[in-house]
Amino acid sequence: MSPVYLDCNASNPIEPRVLQAMLDAYRWLPGNAGSPHVHGHNAKDAVHEARDRIGRVVGAKRNEVFFTSGATESNNLAILGLAKYGLASGKRHVVSSAIEHKAVLEPLERLRSWGFEVTLVKPQGDGRVRIEDLIDSIRTDTLLVSLMHANNETGVIQPISQLAQAAEDRGVWLHVDAAQGFGREFEPLAHRGIASISISAHKIFGPQGIGALILRRQPKEGPVLEPIFVGGGQELGLRSGTLAVPLIVGFGLAAELALQEHAARKQACECIGRIVIDWAESHGGQIHGSAQYRMPHVLNVSFPGWDADDLLESVRESISISDGAACTSVCATASHVLAAMGLCEPQLSGAVRLSWSHQTDRVALVEALASAGRVIAARKLV
């Protein structure tokens, strides 16, 4: 029997309806969306429809959706694209949190090397950053505040709505990395105080390799976002490159389905969550991250006597889980997120992440968890 897939925060299986829409696009939309002929116009129409579908999830207009290769590129564009304006205007201070994804932290480090001052606000022990600490860090020379919507390791939702209002009141550019929350939680991301939002299709059961930057129109006297690479001038000159029409079509449908089926998906994830949490607690698991603010499809937990690498290897025949961010798993270092939360050894080196979806088969899950539980329990007997 194949292991049950419990690493949905890293990437979700593609939705069958999305896959079919992409196959149709590959077959019937061969044109370049930038070409002037009928085939080009057909491709462009499909792209515009996808922009509309994606924009509706966060209350954005068609011309505010810019396609990229994924949330990592979108984060880089939103952060590094402000550097020229910041240097010219003297606004060289940036605020973010210590629990951001590396796709935000590393661009911020690049800004620091260019002469910017970066303030990283630490979270509380429950993984949530205090809104007061964020607001208090904003100064008159602050160019940018960047805060993730939901943490990729703990699933803890951050105070986006309150921060968006504060940013709007102070005239500060707020960027939100919403890779984990887009299509799952809606109201905070619709706040007009958010200037830019990074998203990825594969987090909402769409294809890998396509994402977007939602860029809300700013006042003419405000910051100007510069492209980080140039070429054919696509996406209004902000992101050059031939548009991947089938991937965009899939992204658009995935966004529409996420909006339409949100309630049912959330309910399914909550039911599965109760199974996973009960299982973890029955084996002495120590859960990390606020239960009040945690998204219903993810759990970060450590088990007494287990190192994360040993646990992942020992249960790999039953469940596919991870020890944090998939794109940084090649580094043999403890989670910077959990370290910032104040976790100490052995919880820090033993923490693993389980993340599921509404598609997760509950019968297979119960059997797989039982098998993994026997492995965990066996160590107590040694």
Image: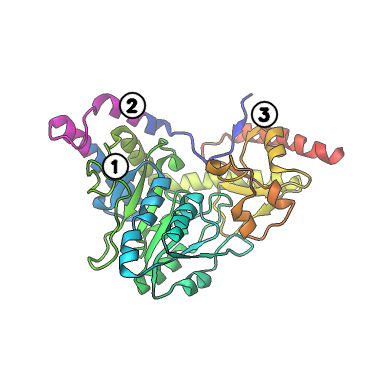
Check if residue 15 falls in the magenta segment.
no
Per the image, the residue denoted by label 1 is: 50
Q: How many angstroms separate mark 2 from mark 3 (CA)? A: 32 Å
Question: Nearer the N terminus, badge 3 or badge 1?
Answer: 1
Foreground: 380 or 112?
112
Per the image, the residue denoted by label 3 is: 317
Q: Tell me residue 139's x, y (percent).
A: 43, 74
Image-based side of 343 in relation to 258, left or right: right
Q: On the rendered image, what quadrant is the N terminus found in? A: top right
Dot 3 amino acid type: Glu
Check if residue 36 falls in the magenta segment.
yes
- At horizontal 21% and vertical 38% (from top left) the residue drawn is 44
The region drawn magenta spans 20-45
For disc 1, the neighbor class at 10 Å (few under 14, some 14 to 19, many from 20) is: many
Q: How many angstroms separate mark 3 from mark 1 (CA)? A: 39 Å
Dot 2 amino acid type: Leu
Against 197, residue 22 (above or below) is above
Against 153, residue 143 (above or below) is below
- At horizontal 86% and vertical 38% (from top left) the residue drawn is 381
Question: Nearer the N terminus, badge 1 or badge 2?
Answer: 2
Q: Is residue 290 visible?
A: no
Foreground: 118 or 208?
118
Q: Is residue 146 visible?
A: yes
Q: Main secondary structure of the magenta part?
A: helix
- At horizontal 47% and vertical 45% (from top left) the residue drawn is 264
